[in-house]
Image (spheres, rainbow, N blue to C red):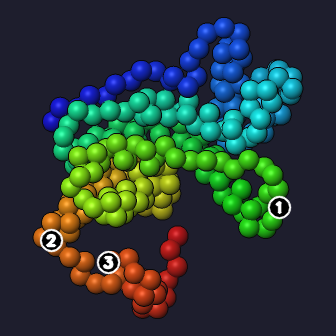
């Protein structure tokens, strides 16, 4: 397997001059607070970074905007991941193998982002979110699409989209949290399970597309009726 991981540095936080230094100062402060388990507002970051609120809001008009840039800084080289392999299985395994240690390094920051996303969803349902800018998350989909590039013309558009959606369940912060908190795994064990699951999904998608295998049940095909039947049969909730 020949894989090229091209790390060009954090281009989103790059730059020179007073403005770039000020922005980096606030992003570093936001990340430090998030690593302490907080979900800071722009005002709180301004206070901790010892800059005026007016200055802080010129750089980050909303908490969501600030958090998104902080996450980009935490993700760092993951966003620049590339591979010269022509095999989808090798590419997806390499992406997870490369990304998980970086995600774990800033795990507290990524968990804080999850907390903010859940908080915004809850307030949105309650009608109390108002005009607050929503947190937008899209890096995972872009990276998975890049990893699966060799299958773009091999699977139908619907099959490709479904595979990307399925892989999003095993690649990212949520998967790491479940594997650690629910399954009790450490970071290395979680990485290995994520790679195993991702390879199984890729192989299943290819086999089904080529007619080698078919879902054995409506539940495996992901139909609503199958999932309802499973819930009735087990009587359990999923944590």
Question: Which residue is drawn at the image coordinates 42% and 21% (left, top)?
Answer: 8
Task: Choose mark 3 or mark 2, whichever is in front.
Answer: 2
The residue pinned by badge 2 equals 211
Nearer the N terminus, badge 1 or badge 2? 1
The residue pinned by badge 1 equals 128
Query: Does residue 3 sit above or below 174 in this rendering?
Result: above
- Which type of secondary structure does the marked residue at label 1 adopt? loop
Question: Which residue is drawn at the image coordinates 23% and 81% (left, top)?
Answer: 216
Pick the residue in front: 60 or 173.
Answer: 60
For the residues labelled 1 and 2, the Cα–Cα distance comes to: 49 Å
Badge 2 crowding class, 10 Å Cα cut-off, few under 14, some 14 to 19, many 20 or more, is few
Q: Quadrant of residue 184?
A: bottom left
Query: Does residue 171 sit above or below 26 in this rendering?
Result: below
Inspect this view and state whether residue 160 appears.
yes
Query: Relative to 51, is 16 on the left or the right?
Result: left
- Which type of secondary structure does the marked residue at label 2 adopt? loop
Point out residue 130 in the picture as x, y percentages from the top left corner. 82, 56
For the residues labelled 3 and 1, the Cα–Cα distance comes to: 38 Å
Query: Relative to 186, is 35 on the left or the right?
Result: right
Point out residue 15 in the picture as x, y percentages from the top left corner. 59, 14
Q: Tell whether label 2 touches label 1 (CB within 8 Å).
A: no
For the residues labelled 3 and 2, the Cα–Cα distance comes to: 16 Å
For this orientation, the residue located farthest to the left is: 212
Query: Relative to 100, is 210 on the left or the right?
Result: left
Question: Which residue is drawn at the image coordinates 69% and 50% (left, top)?
Answer: 134
The residue pinned by badge 3 equals 220
Inspect this view and state whether residue 193 appears.
no
Disc number for residue 52? none
Badge 1 crowding class, 10 Å Cα cut-off, few under 14, some 14 to 19, many 20 or more, is few
Q: Tell whether label 1 touches label 3 (CB within 8 Å).
A: no
Point out residue 16 in the picture as x, y percentages from the top left corner. 61, 9
């Amino acid at each position: 397997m020949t894989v090229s991981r091209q790390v060009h540095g954090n281009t989103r936080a790059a730059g020179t001059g007073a403005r770039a230094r000020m922005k980096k100062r606030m992003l570093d402060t936001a990340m430090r607070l998030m690593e302490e388990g907080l979900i800071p507002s722009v005002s709180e970051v301004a206070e901790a970074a010892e800059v005026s609120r007016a200055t802080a809001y010129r750089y980050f008009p909303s908490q969501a905007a600030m958090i998104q840039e902080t996450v980009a800084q935490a993700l760092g080289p993951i966003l620049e991941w590339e591979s010269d392999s022509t095999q989808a299985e090798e590419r997806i395994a390499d992406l997870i193998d490369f990304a998980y240690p970086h995600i774990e390094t800033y795990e507290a920051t990524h968990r804080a982002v999850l907390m903010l996303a859940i908080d915004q969803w809850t307030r949105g349902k309650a009608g109390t979110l108002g005009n607050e800018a929503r947190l937008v998350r899209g890096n995972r989909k872009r990276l998975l699409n890049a990893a699966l590039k060799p299958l773009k013309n091999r699977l139908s558009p619907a099959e490709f989209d479904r595979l990307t959606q399925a892989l999003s369940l095993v690649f990212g912060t949520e998967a790491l949290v479940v594997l650690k908190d629910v399954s009790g795994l450490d970071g290395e064990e979680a990485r290995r399970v994520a790679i195993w699951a991702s390879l199984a999904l890729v192989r299943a998608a290819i086999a089904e597309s080529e007619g080698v295998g078919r879902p054995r049940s409506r539940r495996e095909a992901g139909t609503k009726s199958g999932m309802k039947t499973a819930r009735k049969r087990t009587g359990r909730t999923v944590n």
